[in-house]
Image: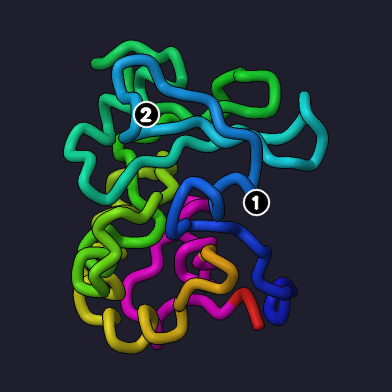
Amino acid sequence: MMAGLKTPRVAVAAVDDGALRTVGYLAKVSGFEGDAVIVRPKVTKNDGVKTVWCKVSCDRYRDAYVAATGQKEGEGIQPLDDNNNVFAYCADVDHVYPRSWARQNGYDDYWLMLYPVMGNVNRSAGASIEKNGFKHYSSRQVPAHGIIWAVDYQIMKMLNHPVYEEKAAVKLFK
């Protein structure tokens, strides 16, 4: 039984470059200077899954993800493992912390982590929790030392698990 696992500590938003540097080492994304970066965790300099982050104001976030991962548009969006090998096919690039929430909170200059998810999973969250859960979740997700950490439904979405409404979701984390 998996119920009762502790929610993993995953950064999903950062107030500025300095806060993002506490998460990992930053590298520019060609063609998206100032709008997108690749973050490699500070676990070690050469290991760890790299993530792509964009400013809330960046409307070309899907293009930035494709540019950052070296994938070709039209081939589908694919997450990469530690060695940059494709391990799943996904249709959508998602802001793990919803961009609409960032805008409603006045976080227009924040960095948001992008993550590839299956289209049906992304839409299940967008049509339910992200649309209706702003007051409940965003009030729990305030920057701590410049970072906003993921809540349970965001982790489930990154695992490609449909989330729907909170009360109907499988409770995996404490």
- Residue 138 in picture, x, y percent from top left: 36, 79
SS for dot 2: helix
Give the side of residue 103 with respect to residue 90, left or right. left
- The three-letter amino acid code for the residue at tag 1 is Thr
Extreme residue in the right direction? 44
Q: Nearer the viewer, mark 1 or mark 2?
A: 1
Give residue 140's position: percent from left, percent from top.
46, 84
The answer to which image quadrant residue 173 occupies is bottom right
Viewer-nearest residue: 142 or 158: 142
At x 20% / y 72%, what residue is drawn?
104
Give coordinates of residue 124: x percent, y percent. Answer: 28, 62
Identify which residue is drawn at 26% across, 25% down: 63
User: Which label sits on residue 22?
Assistant: 1
Q: Amino acid at mark 2?
A: Tyr
Left or right: 149 with respect to 132?
A: right
Q: How many marks?
A: 2
Name the image quarter holding residue 72. Answer: top left
Placement of the C terminus among the 4 image quadrants: bottom right
Whether residues under marks 1 and 2 lie with C-beta atoms below 8 angstroms apart, the answer is no
Q: Which residue is mark 2?
A: 65
Q: How far apart are the alpha carbons under marks 1 and 2?
A: 21 Å
Determine the residue positioned at 30% across, 75% down: 129
Q: Which residues are magenta?
A: 148-171
> x, y (%) of residue 162?
40, 61
Q: Is residue 43 left or right of residue 86?
A: right
> Does the magenta-highlighted stretch encompass residue 102?
no
Residue 162 magenta-drawn? yes
Viewport quadrant of the N terminus: bottom right
Helix, strand or loop status at disc 1: helix
Q: Residue 40, relative to residue 147: is it above or below? A: above
